[in-house]
Image (cartoon, rainbow, N blue to C red):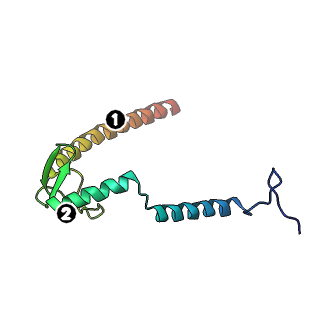
Amino acid sequence: MRTVTTSKGRPRKYRTQAERVRARKEAAERWYAKNKVYSVKTIKRWTELGNLIKTGMKFCPRCEEDLPATDDYFYPRPASIDGFTTYCRDCQSELSTENYYRNKKLKKAVRVESSNGLRKAHKRSL
């Protein structure tokens, strides 16, 4: 049986590209587990959660205030690590209102464009 070699004449370690990628991922996972290296995002989330547990306060980045982490000040959001939305209730309401009117204008503009296009196409066909 003939062995497959690389362009430099060395025997090839992996038969397919998929095997090579899988081996690299496994090696990276082993290295990260051994060296306990975490991403900046993960560390930031842990610190925020630690601060929330210690103080009972949550920071709203939009109004830049520390508010009590309760349902009175933040909407519940089960998907987040602390169970609340990023922004406080007031800021979240303002953002929702802004997005609603911005999207309403965009939808209206698209509707007008498409209806004008249909009218022109209809006139050409007559």
Q: Which of 85 and 49 is in front in this view?
A: 49
Image quadrant in which the N terminus is located:
bottom right
**Residue at mark 1:** 109
Q: Where is residue 82 in the image (x, y as percent from the top left)?
A: 24, 62
Q: Which amino acid does label 1 sit on?
A: Ala
Q: What mark, if any, has residue 53 been given in the picture?
A: 2
The outermost residue toward the front is: 35
Q: Which of 53 and 80 is in front in this view?
A: 53
Say whether residue 7 is left or right of residue 109: right
Q: How many numbered tags mark residues here? A: 2
Residue for point 58% across, 63% down: 27
Q: Where is residue 72 in the image (x, y as percent from the top left)?
A: 10, 58
Say whether residue 65 is left or right of residue 47: left
Residue for point 60% across, 60% down: 24
Q: Upstream in the sequence, badge 1 or badge 2? A: 2
119 up-or-down from 17: above or below: above
Q: Which of 21 and 103 is in front in this view?
A: 21
